């Protein structure tokens, strides 16, 4: 069961009413998937959105042992965007349970974000380093089919990094323009 729902607000003031609404509804997610350890809800107001109906953004991230599910929805109303994101994450949980949850030992099939370091902004006018952000992941062993399914579940459209247990190497799965998948297999030269 999730210890606590973490609610963050960006570019907006989060009222107690909205915080209570979000935390009460998000706290019910472990009923759908008992292995949830962490629930994070990020609410953002985007002033520069092209469409007025896309200014309120609700992002929900659910983590547990061996899985990471994430969804994002936009709308003109914060509660509406959150409710749409909540329904979408419930569908992802149902899809995950149907394919991975039943009959699997530890359910290890996803990489989990451990630490994220932001590079400091240079205020002296000097050129900033080319690497603006660094991330570290725990990479869990899986095969290519599990990597494709995890890429779909997470909503990663471009690429997914995983440890191929069959070939004992880190690999990158990516989606090609024609909709098929490509696989990068690094070789030390």
Image: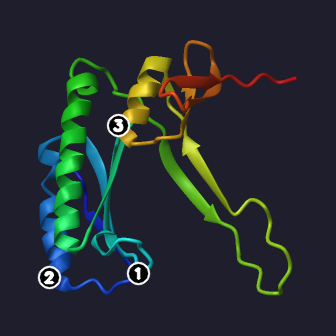
Q: On the picture, is 174 further left or further right than 17?
A: right
Q: Please, what secondary structure does the residue beneath circle 3 have?
A: helix
C-alpha distance separating marks 1 and 3:
29 Å
Q: On the picture, is 93 further left or further right than 122?
A: left
Q: Residues within 10 Å of mark 2 (few under 14, many from 20)?
A: few
C-alpha distance separating marks 2 and 1:
22 Å
- Residue 172, position in %: x, y? 61, 31
The answer to whether the residues at label 2 and label 3 have Cβ atoms under 8 Å apart is no
The residue positioned 49% from the left and 19% from the top of the image is 144
Query: Which one is nearer the viewer's eye here, 106 or 93?
Result: 93
Screen quadrant of the C terminus: top right
Q: Earlier in the sequence, mark 1 or mark 3?
A: 1
In this view of the protein, can residue 65 be seen by the observer? no
Q: Earlier in the sequence, mark 2 or mark 1?
A: 2
Residue mark closest to the camera, 1 vs 3: 1
| Residue picked out by circle 2 | 17
Query: Which one is nearer the viewer's eye here, 102 or 185?
Result: 185
Q: Is 154 rendered above or below residue 165? A: below
């Amino acid at each position: 069961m999730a210890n606590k729902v973490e609610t963050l607000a960006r570019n907006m003031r989060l009222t107690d009413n909205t915080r209570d609404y979000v935390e009460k509804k998000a706290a019910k997610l472990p009923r759908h998937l008992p292995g949830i350890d962490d629930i994070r809800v990020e609410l953002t107001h985007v002033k520069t959105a092209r469409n007025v109906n896309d200014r309120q953004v609700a992002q929900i991230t659910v983590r547990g042992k061996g899985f990471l599910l994430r969804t994002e929805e936009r709308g003109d109303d914060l509660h509406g965007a959150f409710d749409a994101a909540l329904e979408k994450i419930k569908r992802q949980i149902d899809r995950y349970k149907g394919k991975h949850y039943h009959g699997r030992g530890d359910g290890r099939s996803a990489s989990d974000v451990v630490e994220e370091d932001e590079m400091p902004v240079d205020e002296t006018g000097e050129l900033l380093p080319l690497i603006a952000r660094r991330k570290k992941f725990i990479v869990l062993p899986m095969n290519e089919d599990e990597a494709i399914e995890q890429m779909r579940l997470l909503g990663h459209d471009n690429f997914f990094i995983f440890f191929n247990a069959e070939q004992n190497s880190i690999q990158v799965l990516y989606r090609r323009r024609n909709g098929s998948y490509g696989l990068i297999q690094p070789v030390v030269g």
